[in-house]
Amino acid sequence: MLEKELASPATFKIVCFHEPIYCSGGHSPRKDVRAVWESLFIKYGVNIVFQSHNHYYQRSNPINGIIYVISGGGGAPLYNPGYASFVNKSRKAYHYCVLDVNLSRKEMVFYAKDTDGNVFDSIVFHDCSLKVRISRLEDGLYIFNRKIAGMSSPVIIGKIDVVANVTGDASAIEFYVDGILKYNDTAQLYTWAWDEFAIGKHEIMVRAYGNGNTASDEMSVFIFNL
């Protein structure tokens, strides 16, 4: 259900839940939930995640292109926020958050305000329609970088070039195998030559970054490369 909702073609994607997966101070982050959900947030280009449970305000730096906010200043006794390398701003204060969305300008402005209505933090999101697709591979049999027959899924013998087709303004493309970063490309014609020992089923993913946005695509392949 969550993946179905995140896969929608919405201009901006916002996620809200209670116990945080990124925080510093008070209750510890739910790393078990992070292990399951974070990859979906990245895959489908979530812009901002609102969390609670800790009674303070905290905003992260972009983590894999996503902003994480702790908003727990609604009236209960406050906690002391902590420090971590991913934290951009923290405040021990009663507060509330506002999102101002302008779809004609494809802009979303986030504000954090104290109980007197004073803005003490803000950030602007722009939609650059960033999209990425693995374009070199499709269902078929590949032998030493050449497709020679059709099949119901990608089967690779020998090395293969993985190509990322990007729409929008991208500053970098990352190539992953089974969640492990293999190559970072900052030049157009984004290509990575996968030529390493690999046997069996593996997950390939490409991830694009640009203007504070992320996009990704992934596929399963069977490879035999000695």
Image: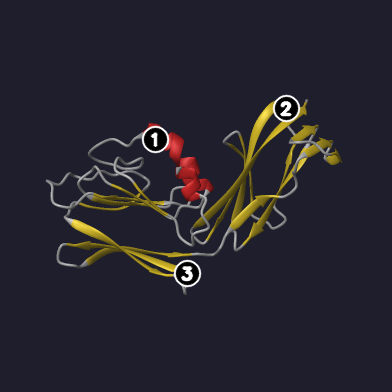
Q: Residue at x 84, y 41 (%)?
A: 147
The front one of 152 and 109 is 152
Image vertical order of residue 20 relative to residue 69, above or below:
above
Query: Is any part of residue 206 visible from this angle?
Result: no
The CA distance from mark 1 to mark 2 is 32 Å
**Residue that mark 3 sits on:** 106
The amino acid type found where label 2 is placed reads Phe
Residue 126: image x %, image y %? 47, 66
Residue 39: image x %, image y %? 49, 41
Residue 142: image x %, image y %? 82, 37
Q: Residue at x 27, y 46 (%)?
A: 52
Labelled disc at residue 33: 1
Label 3 CA crowd tier, 10 Å (few <14, some 14–19, many 20+): some
The amino acid type found where label 1 is placed reads Val
**Upstream in sequence: badge 1 or badge 2:** 1
The CA distance from mark 3 to mark 1 is 31 Å
The front one of 149 and 78 is 149
**Residue that mark 2 sits on:** 197
Image vertical order of residue 122 relative to residue 164, above or below:
below
**Upstream in sequence: badge 2 or badge 3:** 3
Side (left or right) of 58 relative to 76: right
Residue positioned most to the bottom: 104
The amino acid type found where label 3 is placed reads Lys
**Upstream in sequence: badge 3 or badge 1:** 1
The front one of 161 and 139 is 139
The CA distance from mark 2 to mark 3 is 44 Å
Side (left or right) of 1 relative to 155: left
Which label sits in the foreground, 2 or 3? 3
Label 2 CA crowd tier, 10 Å (few <14, some 14–19, many 20+): few
